[in-house]
Image (tube, helix red, strand yellow):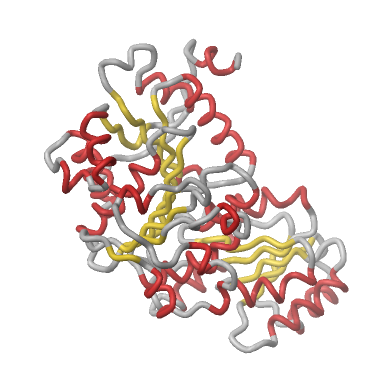
């Protein structure tokens, strides 16, 4: 576990949102916990979300934004403030310093200057409370196998980690993590997401259900009505607290590519994107990756997992998918539906149901690679494109 540097971005210029996100998420250990576009929302965001640094875009109205920054900087346990502006006039820089700004970064922000500023903070906070690793698992389509992978991967990590591991079901309406692990939750995600700024570690720990593997489980809401009251953004405070008390947190989802999911993906260390060797699934994966590229996400955190790979997948191969998506597959899980469906119906992990099965061993290997990244192979983007791409670009 490392020590993350968590950012809130205050930015009223929509055209720069992607630029800021891309700059920040390109830096190791940096997480964006919230993005706000109105100065009046900043104080509440700082109160609600755990944050180390606020990156404030002073343009186009520095005189409006600086008093808000000064108020936040003057509060108890205030985060550090980075400010940026197209103006480098002396009077403005002096005002920012007086407002409590730690670093002033002229536009366009120099990536090396930002990295140096973040590195100073990381060094200063190196002895602070370590944070766990957030692994998000999403399927490129329904039935891709994301829930199965999330539950079993979390159970495997629980046997490797020296600390605790939690799995959180972010499929608010139809999540099946609790069913896959055969646990009966007393409390659910909905019980913890309403006021994350008031949650205490002891409250969260009581809400988690302990699985026989040692894994801790947080289930989806019990009813559709409860599911309607929460969003992925509401979970950031909860996930951040879970990362303070667990070595790994694995999420099943978010399962929709919307603005709310962005908050969770910003916080994620590793995003496992699960695809099957089917044209519709790969088309969806292509759209997801394109949206992430356009949104400034760091695709080095995205790991492609090909599920149900076997002799019956005659139309497409793993190499076809890598070529089409311009992304090297991180792992492949063999097709063994008889074993997987048996474990699902019994509510057992694959490790308990069929420990020597190929599908279980493949997931175990993913867990080991995540736990010891140095032992894994280099995961670079595959940039070659070929004839197979025509299948997907003519959708």
Residue under the image location 83 percent in, 73 percent down? 92
Q: Is residue 224 visible?
A: yes
Left or right: residue 43 versus residue 190 is: right
Q: Relative to 32, say whether 299 is above or below.
A: above
Displayed quadrant of residue 236: bottom right
Q: Is residue 51 visible?
A: no
Residue under the image location 65 percent in, 49 percent down? 259
In depth, the one of 173 and 24 nearer the eye is: 173
Q: Relative to 305, say whether 68 is above or below.
A: below
Residue 62 image point, x, y percent: 84, 69
Quarter holding the C terminus is top right
Left or right: residue 131 versus residue 174 is: left
Displayed quadrant of residue 164: bottom left
Displayed quadrant of residue 185: bottom left
Quarter holding the N terminus is bottom left
In depth, the one of 288 and 27 nearer the eye is: 288
């Amino acid at each position: 576990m490392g020590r993350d540097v968590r950012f809130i971005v205050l930015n009223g210029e929509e055209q720069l949102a992607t630029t800021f996100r891309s700059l920040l998420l390109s830096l190791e250990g940096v997480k964006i916990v919230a993005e706000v576009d109105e100065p009046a929302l900043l104080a509440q965001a700082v109160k609600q979300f755990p944050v180390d640094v606020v990156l404030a875009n002073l343009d186009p109205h520095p005189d409006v934004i600086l008093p808000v920054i000064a108020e936040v900087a003057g509060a108890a346990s205030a985060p550090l403030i980075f400010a940026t502006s197209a103006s480098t006039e002396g009077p403005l820089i002096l005002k920012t310093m007086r407002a409590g700004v730690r670093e002033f970064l002229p536009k366009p922000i120099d990536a090396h200057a930002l990295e140096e500023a973040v590195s100073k903070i990381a060094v200063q906070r190196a002895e602070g409370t370590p944070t766990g690793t957030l692994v998000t698992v999403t399927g490129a389509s329904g039935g891709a196998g994301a829930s199965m992978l999330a539950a079993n991967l979390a159970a495997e990590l629980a046997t490797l980690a020296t600390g605790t591991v939690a799995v959180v079901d972010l499929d608010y309406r139809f999540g099946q993590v609790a069913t896959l692990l055969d646990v009966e939750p007393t409390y659910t995600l909905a019980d913890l997401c309403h006021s994350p700024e008031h949650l205490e570690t002891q409250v969260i720990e009581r809400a988690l259900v302990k699985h026989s593997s040692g894994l801790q489980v947080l289930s989806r809401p019990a009813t559709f009505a409860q599911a309607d009251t929460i969003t992925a953004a509401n979970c950031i405070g909860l996930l951040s607290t879970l990362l303070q008390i667990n070595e790994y947190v694995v999420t099943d989802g978010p399962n929709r590519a919307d603005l709310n999911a962005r908050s969770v993906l910003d916080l994620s260390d590793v995003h496992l994107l699960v695809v099957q060797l089917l044209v519709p699934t790969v088309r969806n994966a292509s759209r997801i990756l394109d949206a992430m590229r356009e949104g400034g996400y760091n695709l080095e955190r995205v790991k492609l997992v090909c599920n149900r790979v076997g002799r019956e997948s005659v139309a497409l191969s793993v190499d076809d998918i890598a070529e089409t998506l311009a992304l090297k597959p991180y792992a492949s899980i063999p097709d063994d539906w008889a074993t997987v469906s048996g474990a699902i119906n019994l509510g057992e992990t694959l490790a308990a149901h069929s420990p020597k099965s190929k599908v279980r061993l493949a997931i175990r290997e993913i867990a080991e690679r995540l736990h010891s990244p140095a032992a894994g192979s280099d995961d670079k983007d595959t940039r070659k494109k070929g004839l197979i791409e025509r299948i997907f670009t003519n959708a």
